[in-house]
Image (cartoon, rainbow, N blue to C red):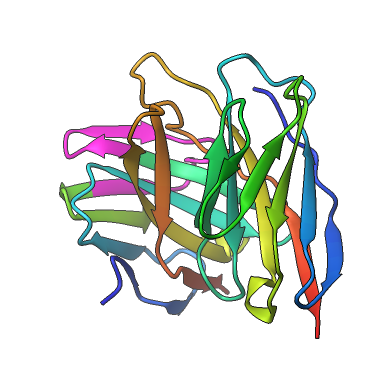
Amino acid sequence: DADVTQTPRNRITKTGKRIMLECSQTKGHDRMYWYRQDPGLGLRLIYYSFDVKDINKGEISDGYSVSRQAQAKFSLSLESAIPNQTALYFCATSDLIRGSGQETQYFGPGTRLLVL
Amino acid sequence: DAKTTQPNSMESNEEEPVHLPCNHSTISGTDYIHWYRQLPSQGPEYVIHGLTSNVNNRMASLAIAEDRKSSTLILHRATLRDAAVYYCILSPKGVTNFGNEKLTFGTGTRLTIIP
């Protein structure tokens, strides 16, 4: 079974609709992240959470909100979807690399979202 | 934040070594160098990281220039499964000692393996 799962894998919605993308992890990590990927722009960070009570905005948080329901679950919501939010969305968790003070991030398979 | 520069694309023959370059001329003394790759239709996956010394693991080797202004990811014997986008990322060491709260992914290098 995958360590980081995302649902749904594909979603088509209409402008103005509220949608939620869900992420679950079985790795036991405290830190979780949401990214979006657009062609030619690489991955951009939307929100990140260091634990259940800690939520932080990334570089492109406008138009998005998140909820950390438990250590294992981190949801991303689009309150009123717009076409330029059409993208590939990735959830990730991270773990400390021993001896370096650095982290490794583990990504889910992604959710492909189309906003009409 | 220090930035990285990578070629947009590279090609290599199967079963030959591949050297993927990354320039980071504004790197600070405490920035670590990370490499991730993204296989088609998948999320990125960690490959390797280092600070000053060259590093090896089961996936690849990382060669870091003495002045740290550039680095090279080395795949010793490329296979078709290595076709992916490779990202070179700088990660500062933060006050929490966790460092890379925010990994900044650029557009990476798209590696094509020729059979």
Q: Position of residue A5 (x, y in %)?
A: 31, 69
Left or right, B85 with respect to A106, comes to: right
Q: Write down the region rendered in magenta.
A: A49-67
Front-most of A26 and B11? Answer: B11
Q: Give the residue drawn at x 74%, y 35%.
A: B4
Q: Give the residue drawn at x 63%, y 77%.
A: B81
Q: Position of residue A92 (x, y in %)?
A: 39, 53
Q: Position of residue B39 (x, y in %)?
A: 60, 70
As drawn, the residue found furthest toward the left would be A70
Q: Is residue B45 above or below residue A31?
A: below
Front-most of A38 and A94? Answer: A94
> Magenta includes A65?
yes
Placement of the C terminus of chain B among the 4 image quadrants: bottom right
Placement of the N terminus of chain B among the 4 image quadrants: top right
Left or right, A39 with respect to B61, comes to: right
Q: Position of residue B53 (x, y in %)?
A: 61, 29
Q: Give the residue drawn at x 43%, y 18%.
A: B94
> Magenta includes A90?
no
